[in-house]
Image (spheres, rainbow, N blue to C red):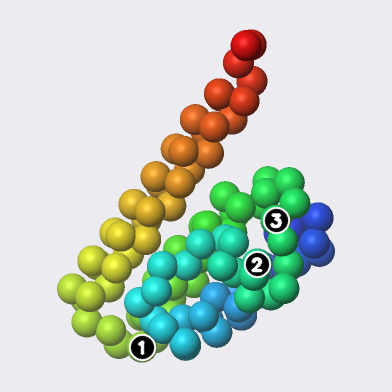
C-alpha cells in the first residue's frame, strides 16, 4: 500500500526500514524523519507522517513480541514511544493553528 505519494514509498518499504533501525538499536526512539533519512528520502508535504507514526508503533510492537523482550521493558519503551509521538502530534497541530492566524 502506498503511504507516501510524494516519494512513492510503500508500507513495506517503511516497515523494512524500521526493522533495520531496530536491528541496529532495538530501544532507540524512531521518528518519521529518521525513517525517511535512512531511506535517503525527505518529507515534502509530511501529510503521510501520522500514518508513518502508526506504522512505527505497530512494527515496533511486533518486533519486540518476536524478540521475546521482557514485558516490563516493552511496556516502558512503548509508553515512551507513544508519549513522544503524541507530544509531536500536538506540537504539529499547534504550529498549524499558529500558521493560520492573522497577524
Ligand atoms: S505524502 Fe509523504 S511527504 Fe508528502
Residue 1: assigned label: none
Residue contact at pointers 2 and 3, CB within 8 angstroms:
yes
Q: Which residue is mark 1?
A: 67
> Which is nearer the eye, 53 or 100?
100
Which quadrant holds the C terminus? top right
Mark 1 Cα within 10 Å, few/some/many (few <14, many 20+)? Answer: few
| Distance in Å between CA atoms under marks 1 and 2 | 24 Å
Splitting the image into 4 quarters, where does residue 13 fall?
A: bottom right
Mark 2 Cα within 10 Å, few/some/many (few <14, many 20+)? Answer: some
Q: Locate residue 57, reporting x and y percent.
A: 45, 63
Splitting the image into 4 quarters, where does residue 67 fall?
A: bottom left
Task: Judge whether 7 appears above or below 62 on screen.
Answer: above
Q: Which residue is mark 3?
A: 43
Residue occupying image coordinates x 59% and y 30%:
96
Task: Give the residue at the far left of this rendering.
Answer: 72
Residue occupying image coordinates x 24% and y 67%:
75
| Distance in Å between CA atoms under marks 2 and 3 | 7 Å
Residue contact at pointers 1 and 2, CB within 8 angstroms:
no
Q: Earlier in the sequence, mark 1 or mark 3?
A: 3
Instruction: For mark 2, give the secondary structure.
Output: helix
Residue 36: assigned label: 2
Amino acid at each position: 500500500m502506498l503511504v507516501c505519494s510524494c516519494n512513492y514509498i510503500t508500507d513495506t518499504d517503511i516497515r523494512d526500514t524500521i526493522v533495520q533501525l531496530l536491528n541496529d538499536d532495538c530501544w532507540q526512539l524512531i521518528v518519521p524523519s529518521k525513517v525517511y533519512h535512512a531511506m535517503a528520502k525527505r518529507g515534502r508535504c509530511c501529510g503521510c507522517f501520522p500514518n508513518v507514526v502508526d506504522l512505527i508503533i505497530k512494527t515496533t510492537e511486533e518486533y519486540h513480541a518476536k524478540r521475546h523482550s521482557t514485558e516490563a521493558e516493552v511496556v516502558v519503551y512503548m509508553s515512551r514511544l507513544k508519549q513522544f509521538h503524541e507530544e509531536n502530534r500536538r506540537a504539529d497541530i499547534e504550529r498549524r493553528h499558529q500558521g493560520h492566524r492573522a497577524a
